[in-house]
């Protein structure tokens, strides 16, 4: 996907909400450090002990639940294409996750850097890869396929 949009930098939580529909308590990204619309996104999340899920997961050894780790990848990845003006603010839907790898427990105090690359976008379906690190150490990654239902419906026979 070839685009000529200028990179964007240091977009905080309020700015992220202008592009995607996730809101507290399910918006997990703190800042989008860099976005190259139609290509790449890098985000940061600082986990503190007062996160709503730590007391329940697990009190004696708090760590970030897997579904939240997946959401970090997905929320970063969707910014690669929701940052394009024609897709800004649209609803998204998980279609597929492949090659999911968890290699490091995420704990209170960790700063997670997530990088996502858009490999293709056709007929409302985005495919790409996202990876997260803590202090340069690999934490998790996945290949993602996420759709924009409004666009996908245009390609279903009789589906408008």
Image (cartoon, rainbow, N blue to C red):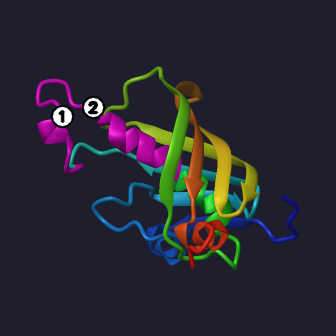
Q: Nearer the viewer, residue 135 or 91?
A: 91
Residue underneath mark 2: 63
* Residue at the spot 44% in from the left edge and 71% down from the top edge: 21
* Residue at the spot 88% in from the left edge and 61% down from the top edge: 2
Q: Is disc 1 placed on a helix, strand or loop?
A: loop
* Cα distance between the residues tagged 2 and 1: 6 Å
Hey, which residue is sitting farthest front in the picture? 158
The image position of residue 34, as x and y in percent, is 67, 58
The image position of residue 145, as x and y in percent, is 59, 47
Q: Earlier in the sequence, mark 2 or mark 1?
A: 1
Question: Mark 1 and mark 2 in contact (Cβ < 8 Å)?
Answer: yes
Q: Is disc 2 placed on a helix, strand or loop?
A: loop
Asked which quadrant contains residue 3, the reply is: bottom right
The image position of residue 76, as x and y in percent, is 55, 53
Q: Nearer the viewer, residue 96 or 11?
A: 96
* Residue at the spot 23% in from the left edge and 43% down from the top edge: 49
* Residue at the spot 21% in from the left edge and 31% down from the top edge: 62
Q: Tell me if I can see residue 122 in this picture.
A: yes
Q: Which mark is residue 75?
A: none
Q: Tell me if I can see residue 133 in this picture.
A: no
Quadrant of the image containing the C terminus: bottom right
Q: How many marks?
A: 2
- Residue 119 on the magenta segment: no
Q: Which mark is residue 57?
A: 1
- Residue 57 on the magenta segment: yes
Region of the chain picked out in magenta, as a range: 51-74
Q: Nearer the viewer, residue 44 or 26?
A: 26
Q: Which class describes the residues within 10 Å of circle 1: few (<14), some (14-19), or many (20+)?
A: few
Q: Is residue 146 left or right of residue 6?
A: left
Q: Which class describes the residues within 10 Å of circle 2: few (<14), some (14-19), or many (20+)?
A: many
- With respect to residue 67, does 10 lie above or below? below
Q: Is residue 97 left or right of residue 40?
A: left
């Amino acid at each position: 996907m070839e685009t000529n949009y200028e990179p964007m930098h240091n977009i905080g939580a309020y700015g992220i909400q202008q592009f995607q529909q996730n809101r507290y308590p399910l918006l997990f990204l703190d800042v989008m450090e860099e976005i190259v619309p139609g290509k790449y996104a890098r985000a940061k999340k600082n986990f503190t002990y007062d996160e709503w899920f730590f007391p329940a997961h697990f009190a004696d050894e708090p760590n970030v639940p897997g579904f939240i780790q997946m959401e970090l990848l997905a929320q970063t990845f969707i910014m690669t294409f929701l940052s394009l003006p024609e897709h800004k603010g649209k609803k998204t839907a998980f279609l597929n996750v492949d090659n999911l790898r968890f290699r490091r427990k995420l704990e209170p105090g960790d700063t997670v850097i997530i990088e996502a690359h858009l490999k293709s976008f056709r007929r409302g379906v985005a495919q790409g890869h996202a990876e997260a690190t803590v202090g340069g150490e690999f934490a998790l990654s996945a290949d993602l396929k996420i759709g924009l239902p409004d666009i996908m419906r245009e390609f279903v026979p009789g589906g408008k």
